[in-house]
Amino acid sequence: MVRAEVMRDEQRLRRIEAVTDATLSRLDVADLFDELLDRVRDLLQVDTAAILLLDVRAQQLVATAARGLEEEVRQGFRVSVGRGFAGQVALTRQPVILQTVTSDNVVNPILLETGVQSLLGVPILARGELVGVLHVGTLTPRRFDLDDVRLLELVADRVSLASRARENTLDQAAALALQRSLIPTELPHLPGLELAGRYVPGHASGVGGDWYDVFTLPSGWVGVVVGDVSGHGLQSAVVMGRVRSALRAYALVCDDPAEALTLLDRKVVHFEAGSLTTALYAMISPDRGTLCVSVAGHPRPVLAGPGCPNTVVAAHIDPPLGAGRQQQRRHSTTFDFPPGSVLVAYTDGLVERRGELFDTGVARLTEAVPLAPVDTVTATVMATLDTEHPADDIALLAVRRPLG
């Protein structure tokens, strides 16, 4: 009797080790799902195993991986939460055992066509939220016991961890694709101007809400924008994309940067509640000799010109976009932009350093800007301000009016 109990304990330990093996973590998510299903089929001596993940918006379970029921995945089988066997597991968030499978308790025709006789399903949960359903089945009648349930729940926990990693990977890929589409690798070639930009992510996700933009307007003026949406990751990148597009639209109907930022502020307050955005919007005249600048809670740009010291542009700083303050008139300031001048706009990640006053970083930047082609300007600034390991995202845009 004692020996039988020892053998059962040893078998239980081998089962646990099989589904918590550290080598599983080295697999990508799709391979990990398949490997877990192979192992659980062997350990529980079942014929089928399947993972259905929850589509939150549709409130449907979607067949994502399967063994013995591969047709489920090929057909993209879906079942609503509450319907059928898997739907009941999802609805109750409790294990469900079907000793006998019939068309009354199963809605998936593939299960019936395969000849599955008995089923055991458990919910896949993450932080108390439903992620999906894991179920196994046999082609002969089977009485699943408590040990079977516990082992399948252990596998479901492993699937939960993998599915969260999968979501994070998909979110990061989507955010990177979005940000790369919105922050151009090549700026437009415009007569009478040289342009260069740099973007450096300050977080492991590689994405955030910083951006720069340059566009021509029907009037012949050129719009130059640098902005920073609070936060990081996919959500900030999405908000950044909407803010960027809205500003472009307002720029088409506004001849004054302050007016465009006023409209943008209303949009952010109303449609992007909770998202604080800073922005600099400058317009360069068709003859390239004039800058008109409006600043919404953003660092003021640096202007370098021949025969005079580099300076921070003396533009009025209005409240950030989305701050929700009582709206007062926003300001635009006009400056000369003589031949040979360089304008450098940036986000605060370029100059902010822990334990150092913000103005110290701005002074370092101001001194670093050379009267040179824009590629030299950006390279010099990035090297001088040590941007290889930033604590925050960095967006940098240099605009030069060439001599002659």
Image (tube, rainbow, N blue to C red):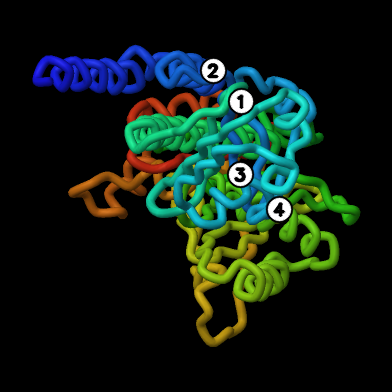
Between marks 4 and 2 in the image, the one whose residue lies nearer the viewer: 2
Q: Secondary structure at mark 3?
A: helix
Marks 1/3: CA–CA distance: 14 Å
Q: Earlier in the sequence, mark 4 or mark 1?
A: 4
Q: Earlier in the sequence, mark 4 or mark 2?
A: 2
Label pair 2/3, CB-CB below 8 angstroms: no
Amino acid of disc 2: Asp
- In the picture, the disc for residue 193 is none
Residue 390 in view: no
The residue identified by callout 3 is: 86
The quadrant of the picture occupied by the C terminus is: top right
Marks 4/1: CA–CA distance: 19 Å
Q: Secondary structure at mark 1?
A: strand
> Quadrant of the rendered structure where residue 187 is?
top right
The residue identified by callout 2 is: 34
Marks 2/3: CA–CA distance: 19 Å
Amino acid of disc 3: Ala
The residue identified by callout 1 is: 65
Between marks 1 and 3 in the image, the one whose residue lies nearer the viewer: 3
- Vertical side of 287 occupied by 314: above or below: below
User: Percent position (x, y) of residue 385?
Assistant: 35, 34
The residue identified by callout 4 is: 58
- Residue 183 is left or right of residue 169, and the answer is right
Identify the residue shown where x is 72% and y is 23%.
114
**Disc 2 crowd, CA 10 A, few/some/many (<14, 14-19, 20+):** some
Label pair 3/4, CB-CB below 8 angstroms: no
